[in-house]
Image (cartoon, rainbow, N blue to C red):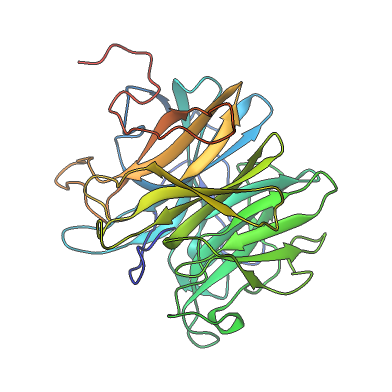
C-alpha cells in the first residue's frame, strides 16, 4: 500500500454471494465463483466505479492481464479501512471482469487487520502473493509482509509459511509501519528478489522456496523515497518506480523512478514520472507491458459512490499508457479522464 511517510493506509472488503470464505486461515482463502462474473466496460478513469479500489498491482499471464487491488471501505472522516484484496482481469484493456475478493487480511492466522498493498508474482507454475498487513500485536508490533500462494492467479490463496516473512523487529526504521509495499522480481537464472519499504527502501534475495531470505536485508539509496516501490525491466535496464515526497514542493506523494544495470543497483534517479493524485496524498504505481504496450496503473481520490465522496480512504484505480524515450528513460505520464478507453468521451 502506500502510507505517505508517517501515515497509514489501505484496505478492502467486498461481500460476493457467489464466493465462499473458508473457515481455516491455514488452508485456503476464498474459493473462486463457479457462477457468472460481472463485466465492466472501460469508460475512462477511474476504471471501476461501483466501489473504491487502491494500490493497483498488475500481472500478465498469457493473453490476460490480472489486476489486484485493495478495497477501500472508509466512511466519513475515517482514515484507512481495508480488509481484503479484489481481483479483475482483461484481455483487451476495454472489458474487465470483476472476480471479487481473492483473500482477506485475516486469512493469515497471525494477522490482526489491514489488507494493504500487494503484488502477485508468477514463478514455476505458482502464484506468490506478497502483501502488507498488521501483525497480531501479541506476537509483533506493527506492519509485516506476508506470503500466500496459489495454483491459479485467482486463487484460492493460502498462507505459504504460517508466519510473517518480514516483521518490524527485523529491520531498523523510523516507525513500526516501514515494512510494507512489497514488489518482486525474478531474474532469468531463477533468482528472485523482494524490494519493499516505507521511508527506507529495502532489498533482499529470496530462497528458491520464495518464503525465506537467502542473504541479508540491505537498503537502497533513492531520493525522496516515501513508499510503494514497483520493480520491472525493459531490455537491459532495470526500473524502480516509487512514491516520492519533497515537502518543499508538496505534502502529497508523486511517482518518481530510478534505473540500474542490475537488480542490485547502483540505482540512478531519473526524475518524476507522474504528479500527485487529486484528493489523495498517497499514490501507488503498478507498471506492466501488455500486448506490446506499457501501462501505468495508479489511484486517485475523485470517485463518488453512493453517499460517499472520494478521499484518502476512498480511492479509485486509474490507468494510462506509458512511453519510453530512445535512451530508455520514461516520458512523464499525465493523468487523464480518458485513460486508455476507446469510447467517446463526453
Q: Where is residue 75 in the image (x, y as percent from the top left)?
A: 21, 57
Residue 163, compared with residue 140, is above or below; it is above
Task: Give the residue at the far top of this rendering.
Answer: 344
Q: For this view, does 261 lie left or right of residue 17?
A: right
Query: 171 or 149: nearer the eye?
Result: 171
Looking at the image, how many numbered discs can be counted on the residues? 0
Task: Give the residue at the far right of this rendering.
Answer: 189
Q: Position of residue 30 (x, y in %)?
A: 56, 51
Quadrant position of the C terminus in the picture: top left
Residue 161 visible, this orientation: yes
Q: Which residue is drawn at 52% across and 71% down?
A: 179
Q: Residue at x 72, y 38 (%)?
A: 236
Residue 286, compared with residue 211, is above or below; it is above
Quadrant position of the N terminus in the picture: bottom left
Query: 270 or 185: nearer the eye?
Result: 270
Task: Give the residue at the far bottom of this rendering.
Answer: 138
Query: 311 or 82: nearer the eye?
Result: 311
Residue 150 visible, this orientation: no
Residue 27, compared with residue 215, is above or below; it is above
Q: Where is residue 55 in the image (x, y as percent from the top left)?
A: 43, 50
Q: Residue at x 53, y 80 (%)?
A: 168
Query: 126 or 26: nearer the eye?
Result: 126
Q: Where is residue 44 in the image (x, y as percent from the top left)?
A: 32, 25
Amino acid at each position: 500500500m502506500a502510507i505517505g511517510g508517517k501515515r497509514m493506509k489501505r484496505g478492502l472488503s467486498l461481500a460476493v454471494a457467489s464466493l465462499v470464505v473458508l473457515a481455516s486461515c491455514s488452508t485456503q482463502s476464498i474459493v473462486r465463483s463457479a457462477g457468472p462474473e460481472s463485466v465492466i466496460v472501460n469508460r475512462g478513469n477511474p476504471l471501476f466505479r461501483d466501489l473504491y479500489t487502491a494500490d493497483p498491482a498488475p500481472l500478465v499471464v498469457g493473453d490476460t492481464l490480472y489486476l489486484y487491488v485493495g478495497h477501500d471501505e472508509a466512511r466519513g472522516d475515517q482514515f484507512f479501512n481495508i480488509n481484503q484484496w479484489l481481483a479483475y482481469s482483461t484481455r483487451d484493456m476495454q472489458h474487465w471482469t470483476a472476480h471479487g475478493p481473492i483473500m482477506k487480511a485475516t486469512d493469515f492466522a497471525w494477522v490482526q487487520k489491514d489488507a494493504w498493498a500487494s503484488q502477485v508474482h508468477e514463478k514455476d507454475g505458482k502464484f506468490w502473493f506478497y502483501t502488507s498487513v498488521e501483525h497480531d500485536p501479541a506476537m509483533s508490533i506493527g506492519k509485516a509482509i506476508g506470503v500466500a500462494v496459489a495454483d491459479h492467479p485467482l486463487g484460492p490463496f493460502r498462507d505459504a509459511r504460517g508466519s510473517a516473512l518480514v516483521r518490524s523487529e527485523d529491520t531498523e526504521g523510523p516507525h513500526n509501519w516501514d515494512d510494507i509495499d512489497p514488489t518482486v522480481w525474478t531474474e532469468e537464472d531463477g533468482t528472485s528478489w523482494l524490494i519493499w519499504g516505507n521511508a527506507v527502501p529495502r532489498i533482499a534475495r529470496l530462497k528458491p522456496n520464495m518464503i525465506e531470505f537467502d542473504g541479508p536485508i540491505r537498503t537502497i539509496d533513492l531520493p525522496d523515497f516515501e513508499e510503494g516501490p514497483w520493480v520491472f525491466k525493459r531490455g537491459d535496464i532495470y526500473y524502480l518506480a516509487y512514491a516520492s515526497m519533497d515537502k518543499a514542493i508538496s505534502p502529497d506523494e508523486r511517482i518518481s523512478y530510478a534505473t540500474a544495470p542490475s537488480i542490485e543497483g547502483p540505482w540512478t534517479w531519473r526524475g518524476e514520472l507522474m504528479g500527485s493524485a487529486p484528493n489523495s496524498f498517497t499514490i501507488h504505481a503498478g507498471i506492466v507491458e501488455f500486448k506490446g504496450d506499457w501501462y501505468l496503473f495508479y489511484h486517485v481520490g475523485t470517485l463518488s459512490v453512493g453517499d460517499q465522496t472520494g478521499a484518502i480512504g476512498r480511492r479509485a484505480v486509474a490507468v494510462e499508457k506509458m512511453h519510453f524515450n530512445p535512451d530508455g528513460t520514461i516520458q512523464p505520464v499525465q493523468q487523464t479522464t480518458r485513460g486508455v478507453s476507446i469510447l467517446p468521451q463526453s
